[in-house]
Image (cartoon, rainbow, N blue to C red):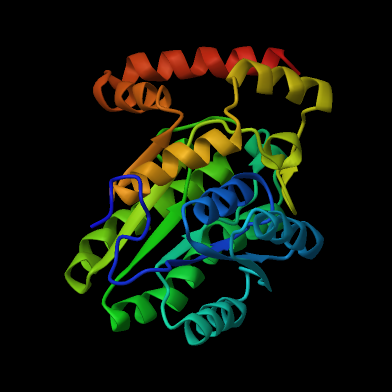
Amino acid sequence: MAPSTGLRIFAGAGAVAVITGGASGIGRALSHELASRGCEVVIADLQEELALATAAEIQSRGGKASFRRVDVRHYDSMVAAVQETFERCGRLDFFFNNAGIGVGGDTHLHTVETWDRIIDINLKGVVYGVQAVYPVMRSQGFGHIVNTASTAGLIAVPGVAAYTATKHAVVGLSKSLRLEAAAAGVRVSTLCPGVVRTPILQGGGVMGRIHGFSQTAMDKVIRFMRPMEPEEFARQALDDVARNRSIIVVPRWWRILWWQHRLMPSQWQSAIDERIYRYIQRLR
């Protein structure tokens, strides 16, 4: 096995990774960091211009990167990306189910269409990725599936109920699959970012939506949350991926909130959460 921060953790050399949503935000940072550690990356995204630019940046630094147009809402699109990569490279070491959007604001402002959109991308997109890549990894006898959830998948977060629902589901899927997949030599980890400076913070990302907050109010909320830069997130997160951690919480101090929610009496934690929510509401 390679050193703990290395990524060529399986037989042979030249690890290959597919990253959905790899053109921007956390996905872009993961693409760069994976390439810098010697991994060939396939940027699977709908944002063709951004994806091609990211691939070109990686190539200019001596890395291997390519673009594959993928819509995670469509299973056939995911299968095609997996099969093409596997047939071309002869292996698939990592699959990052990273594409996602944000939907924020009070639940009464949501529409059924909003719910359908976030479930299609944040949950069904992950399900489709798993169903596309897991049989391939089982067949080759190794691989690592990394699903991007959120700290909102570990704790209750008011004001983002739809987002929280999808991310809790991703955590549950990943924990169950990890236990099942181990016997086949396949690893499964869940990324649970705290607040990271990505397009989701500004307007929910591609096809996302923030209800009831002006941009000025959003800027205040973002400053309050002290977001981490995506490049630093990627470095820390991939160190934990290489160590085969199950739940990966970055920034590290968000682990305190996670443990607090697990250990503190529920009525105390609810009172704290309600005060934070009221404070955020006043920032509008």
On the image, the x and y values in percent for residue 222 come to 67, 23
Q: Answer left or right for 278 relative to 187.
A: right
Q: Is residue 161 above or below residue 15?
A: above
- Extreme residue in the bottom direction: 87
User: Which residue is located at x 67 percent, y 39 percent?
Assistant: 198
Observer-nearest of 169 and 5: 5
Q: Is residue 146 above or below residue 85?
A: above
- Report which quarter residue 255 is drawn in: top left
- Extreme residue in the left direction: 183
Report if residue 181 is visible in the image.
yes
User: Which residue is located at x 56 percent, y 30 percent?
Assistant: 195
Q: Quadrant of the C terminus?
A: top right
Q: Answer left or right for 11 relative to 169.
A: left
Q: Answer left or right for 230 relative to 182.
A: right
On the image, the x and y values in percent for residue 24 come to 69, 50
Q: Is residue 80 above or below residue 211?
A: below
Q: Answer left or right for 216 relative to 60.
A: right
- Report which quarter residue 260 is drawn in: top left
What count of labels does the image hold? 0
User: Which residue is located at x 31 percent, y 81 percent?
Assistant: 140
- Extreme residue in the front direction: 62
User: Which residue is located at x 28 percent, y 48 percent?
Assistant: 3
Report if residue 160 is visible in the image.
no
- Report which quarter residue 53 is drawn in: bottom right
Q: Quadrant of the N terminus?
A: bottom left
Q: Is residue 194 above or below residue 143?
A: above
Observer-nearest of 226 and 110: 226
On the image, the x and y values in percent for residue 226 come to 59, 20
On the image, the x and y values in percent for residue 88 come to 53, 84
